[in-house]
Image (cartoon, helix red, strand yellow):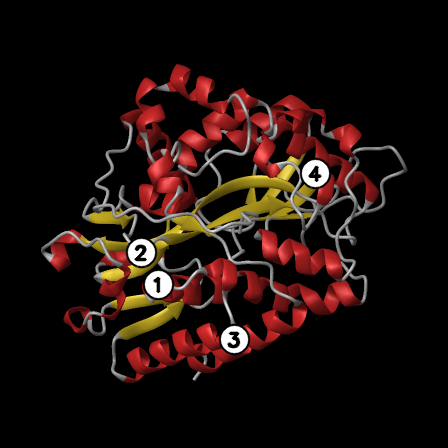
Amino acid sequence: MSNNSTSQPRRPRSTASNSFPTSAARSVLDRRRFLQALGALGLSGPLLAACGGSASDSSSEPGAVASSFRVSNWPFYMDEETLPAFAAATDIEVIYSEDFNDNEEYFAKIREPLSRNQDIGADLIVPTSWMVQRLMGLGWLAQLDLGNIPNLANIEPTLANPAFDPGRAHSVPFVSGFTSFAYNKELTGRPLTSLTELFDPEWAGQVNFFSDLRDGIGLVLKSMGRSLQSVTKADVEAAVEKVAKAKADGQIRRFTGNDYGDDLVAGNVAVGMAYSGDVAQLKLDNPALEFVFPEEGMTQFVDNMVIPITTGAGAKAAAETFMNYLYDPVVNARLIASVQYISPVVGVGEELEKLDPTLSGNVLINPPAEIRELAEDWRPLTDEEDIEFSSLYNTVVSS
């Protein structure tokens, strides 16, 4: 999540019916076909940016840059061109996995090896800001050598100095976006504009919720008119009670992480919580899908590149080289045109205009003020609150 510190006023807005640029859509479609082809060949993960599959070089001599490193990232966060182009430009191979499905789920996987200072199978990971704060608090993130990332000077100024990581000593923003819901207009038969649709009995058994506290309960709190900047335990308890009743009534089909897309595409759900950029790509498989900027507001997030303390020196230098590469506006514009999220890099807007002038009008990439004002982030939670609130929600999710 991003680091907004104040609540923003809400403006009613009808549902957005976005038209996605042909060139950008073609790039995403090529990527999705590329991944599907790898899957058909049994090569779906880890995905390699170039030939070969060597693990991270954790035994490199000081000052040396490893010839490969490993990335764990969310689905729908990479285009087809960036990794091969990076390999060609640097002779560094990226061993790339789309195995980041949920912040808490991923944390549960890595907490034991990191607590023992053991390899986690990745040299660069992409958690959301609040998870970065947790990992930093545990001492599990390496301090970045900013001398290896001179292009970080291109960072969007509002993201340059977050409270959880002053001066970006441990993290570099990858993309930001919005959490709301999407719907299948062929199944609903009408446009949807409100978060109350998540609880409308008309869609009973056809609704998916996110299993993550901030994404799932965050949207429920917004549907109840609560501010995430002043959220209390009582607010969370009320929201959890509302979700528990919906589950008991058969309203919710299932709770998901980032694996929600298949249900939307297949028509298994009419309404489902969703991330903004994902829907741009899912529409290529099912054009009936629409992402909603709800009238009650939505949540926002920033996902960040970080390096675990278990990463070897050579792989760390390679990962920092990759961060620097992504902060070239030309490179980042190509990536953003495909993934359809908001870039953290200054100068990308001009480069997107060169790629396709219609991209500047895509509200998922370049949201206007009235959409940004609909988005709100959670206030920082203490470790105790994080555990308590998550536990309250997990009792419903896992029951």
C-alpha gap between disc 4 and disc 1: 42 Å
Q: Choose the circle earlier in sequence order: 3 or 1.
A: 1
Q: Nearer the viewer, mark 4 or mark 3?
A: 3
Residue at the disc numbered 3 = 233
Residue 33, how many percent across, how many down?
Answer: 36, 40
Q: Would you say the residues marked 3 and 1 are in contact, meaning their CB atoms lie under 8 Å apart?
A: no
C-alpha gap between disc 4 and disc 3: 39 Å
C-alpha gap between disc 1 and disc 2: 7 Å
Q: Would you say the residues marked 1 and 2 are in contact, meaning their CB atoms lie under 8 Å apart?
A: yes
Q: State left or right for residue 157 relative to residue 214.
A: right
Q: Choose the circle earlier in sequence order: 4 or 1.
A: 1
Residue at the disc numbered 1 = 225
C-alpha gap between disc 3 and disc 1: 15 Å
Residue 99, how many percent across, how many down?
Answer: 53, 55
Q: Residue at x 37, y 35 (%)?
A: 369
Amino acid under disc 3 = Lys
Q: Nearer the viewer, residue 11 or 205?
A: 11
Q: Nearer the viewer, residue 23 or 34?
A: 23
Q: Nearer the viewer, mark 4 or mark 2?
A: 2
Amino acid under disc 1 = Gly
Residue 16 seen:
yes
Residue at the disc numbered 4 = 319
C-alpha gap between disc 2 and disc 3: 21 Å
Q: Residue furthest left?
A: 189
Residue at the disc numbered 2 = 296
Question: What is the secondary structure assignment of the residue under circle 2?
Answer: loop
Amino acid under disc 4 = Ala
Vertical comparison of 331 with 299: above or below = above
Q: Residue at x 37, y 30 (%)?
A: 27
Disc 1 crowd rating (10 Å Cα; few below 14, some 14-19, many 20+) is few
